[in-house]
Image (cartoon, rainbow, N blue to C red):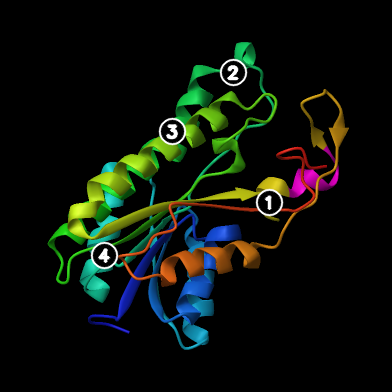
Amino acid sequence: MDGTATRVAVVTGAGSGIGRRTAATLAKDGFAVVLAGRRVANLDAGCAEILAGGGSACAVATDVTDEQSVATLFRTAVDRFGRVDLVFNNAGVNLGDASPDQLDLEDWQRVVATNLTGVFLCVREAFRVMKRQTPTGGRIINNGSLSAHVPRPHSIAYTATKHGVTGLTRAASLDGREYGIACGQIDIGNAATDLTARMESGVRQADGSVRAEPTIATEDVARAVSYMASLPLDANVQFMTVMATGMPFVGRG
């Protein structure tokens, strides 16, 4: 579908896991979806899945840590579909266990560049587009994490960036008000993706033990994002937590 679509969504980290499932769900909801990520083959496969189902989509190879790459992503979305109504900032990376004294600066910077700076760059471009399009406004949903609330052991870089995303979400929500830009955050606990595959064999707990943890389907997360995206711009889910019921959080497990 070319020209102006009714609603247009940009999804980062859309090649697999939560991003790919959410892109497919948004397409079923009537969004034209721009799938962004680093792995072109995966993006193309996700795009083909949407097109085969009668939806509208395109794939744009994107490095969210590079400002020119992010600018190209949003320019492509506008050129192809006319506007941007929704951004789901989903791209992120994590490291293996590393206590603070063992963490290399290069690894710290890589996590910060993707999980925090990447979200900022996408928010910045979204504001630039949403402020000047007609009608103005749109919605930004940032993928936080339960790590935006409490850390896992040996996760200082990931935890710090996810706390940073919460601050970014709050600031963007405030700054977007006068332009009709709503910004919210979804904090996800143990969605079943490649990043959480180790949950089945066991992960380190705060008491030093190693235990398996339950997961939830990516479809459950996608439905939650879809609900947030369905609201009119004068209503906003500021923060939503979606998690496996039995995982160790707020005293559970």
Tell me which numbered mark, 3 or 4, is placed earlier along the sequence.
Answer: 4
Mark 2–mark 1 Cα distance, whole angstroms, equals 22 Å
For residue 89, above or below residue 28: above
Mark 4–mark 1 Cα distance, whole angstroms, equals 29 Å
Q: Give the label on residue 76, or none.
A: 4
Tell me which numbered mark, 1 or 3, is placed earlier along the sequence.
Answer: 3
Label 3 sits on residue: 164
Q: Give the magenta range.
A: 197-202
Q: Are marks 4 and 1 in contact (CB under 8 Å)?
A: no
Mark 3–mark 2 Cα distance, whole angstroms, equals 19 Å
With 204 as the anchor, is 151 left or right in this view? Answer: left
Q: Is residue 242 visible?
A: yes
Q: Nearer the viewer, mark 3 or mark 2?
A: 3
Tell me which numbered mark, 4 or 1, is placed earlier along the sequence.
Answer: 4
Q: Position of residue 203 (x, y in %)?
A: 79, 36
Q: Quadrant of residue 252?
A: top right
Label 2 sits on residue: 103
| Secondary structure found at label 1 | helix
Mark 1–mark 3 Cα distance, whole angstroms, equals 24 Å
| Secondary structure found at label 3 | helix
Label 1 sits on residue: 194
Q: Which amino acid type corresponds to the residue marked 4 in the rendered image?
A: Thr
